[in-house]
Amino acid sequence: MLGVDPDPLALWPGGPSAGGQGLAPAEAAAAAILEHCRALIDATAEACVAVKLQLARFELLGAPGWTVLAQVAEHARRAGLLVIADGKRGDIPVTAEAYAAGLLGGQHTPFGHLDGLGADLVTVNPLMGRDTLEPFVAAAREAGAGVLVLVRTSNPGARDIEDLPIAGEGTVWERIAALVHELGASAAQGDGLSDVGAVVGATEPGHLARARELMPAAPFLLPGVGAQGGRVEDLAAAFAPGRAGGLVTASRSIAGAHRTHGGEPAAAARAEAERLRERTWALSGEALAVS
Amino acid sequence: MLGVDPDPLALWPGGPSAGGQGLAPAEAAAAAILEHCRALIDATAEACVAVKLQLARFELLGAPGWTVLAQVAEHARRAGLLVIADGKRGDIPVTAEAYAAGLLGGQHTPFGHLDGLGADLVTVNPLMGRDTLEPFVAAAREAGAGVLVLVRTSNPGARDIEDLPIAGEGTVWERIAALVHELGASAAQGDGLSDVGAVVGATEPGHLARARELMPAAPFLLPGVGAQGGRVEDLAAAFAPGRAGGLVTASRSIAGAHRTHGGEPAAAARAEAERLRERTWALSGEALAVS
């Protein structure tokens, strides 16, 4: 799966030139990022089933970034890809409803229907507890979409809070995993997967078997492959259900493949996405497993 | 302190009429929300020191919402108020840098300098650990701003994860509190307050004394007064340092005061903000204590 995480300092060459059209910086950066994202998606769509859009990179551009975010999501959909809005939002229920509406199906108002981003999956942060997750789950069900809850993330700091041992049993992340299983259990889809999934970092593969045990039906989003050091070969446990249970995502290692492997950016990205797909397929042992 | 949390279903009457100008729904809603927020700030500015902008409500409108967010922040600054960007962001370090740049001082790029929102304080979510907080702290120091870390939130679900007992000592939220103290300790300001503060819900005042013990120099943002049931009278422990250590924030109870107390919305909001200020002043025992 392709992570779209457009750093304005590392866009592919060949896009709109900086400041060449008298645009404000945010507008010029947004135009270049749109070009970059479209090219990246075009290059890799055949080797992917989904794009993960890193909202921070679009939010950094203000209003022009939010316009481009919607355009990139639309471009990905037209390429036949699922859209994951990676915002890791989380707030009290009334606020979670607003976040969910914005990223999923929108909201009816006296001003007309506000369109949401129409994402197929959204990432959410569970620190504030179950009542802050439920509005996302409800809005996702309404929209035919899904929710991916941060369970055990890929960064070193995950040890500080997520790995804390709870008195009597397990860790914080295992408690979150139990919550994910509860929230999703009633809504298992026809393919046996729940509509509430988990983000489980690929950098600590030792946790995957336990995560799968706690969340047997949850789709796993597996970030951390590539730039963060995770290896696809270590992720077999995620695919234990024998289904499309894992979404292996890489961002910088695909978009920046030409820096590592040489060649033209689009061709290098395509080759890297295909390598990732092949390794994932080999691992999951299923032609339908996702890359 | 005024919480600005504009629900498109509960705006003050008298703003732009719905769909009256041939605008798209998001643009019409954004125009009405801008009008509402300006009127709310104008009505209450004299009784407040800060506004807390709930990013979800602006994000729901897409690009027009992001434009209005910047305009509301500017309006608040011109009214002499501090601006708190309440987004509760949190992500891996490279992404946290992008969020921090967007909400604080912006970023230099080949396209020119991208302006940030210029917030004075940003709320952040610590679930993913210390390395995800450090980019916000660094960007805030660079911009002369501060960070407010979720420690023990005001919603019932706070009990699910934040209140979990850690093996051997304390709870998850107490561990987060210790992290907040560590991050802020080296940067205590001239007034004795740190530039890394804490969000501590006003709905469970029993936690406040312990929170103050763990974070003696942290400014506390105290949400949950009003619509969520918290009472100013119960918050004395937050002000134990004898300084402007607490920011008592109310959103719906101020903007919706006319529904509770009757009268014209602006006058009712002003009266409610003044009531909140007086109760806070009485509690903190200092004329400079913040409302």
Image (tube, coloured by chain):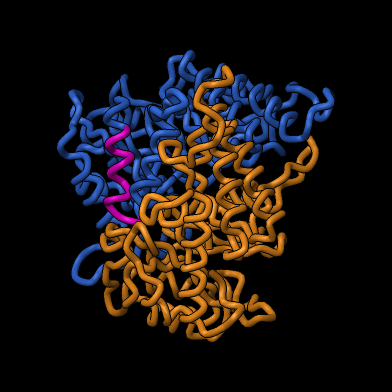
Chain colours: A orange, B blue
Residue A250 lies, in percent from the top left, at: 45, 60
Residue A232 lies, in percent from the top left, at: 40, 72
Quarter of image, res A201: bottom left
Depth check: give the residue in front, B57 or A228. A228
Residue at 53% of width from left, 37% of height from top? Answer: A14
Residue at 39% of width from left, 27% of height from top? Answer: B108
Residue A105 lies, in percent from the top left, at: 70, 52
Whether residue B242 sits left or right of residue B162 in the image: it is left
Magenta segment main secondary structure:
helix
> In which quadrant of the rendered image does the C terminus of chain B lie?
top left
> In which quadrant of the rendered image does the N terminus of chain B lie?
top left
The residue furthest front is A263
Residue A181: tell me if it is visible.
Answer: no
Depth check: give the residue in front, A87 or A42. A42
Residue at 60% of width from left, 38% of height from top? Answer: A66
- Magenta region: which residues? B127-139
Residue B138 shown in magenta: yes
Quarter of image, res A23: top right
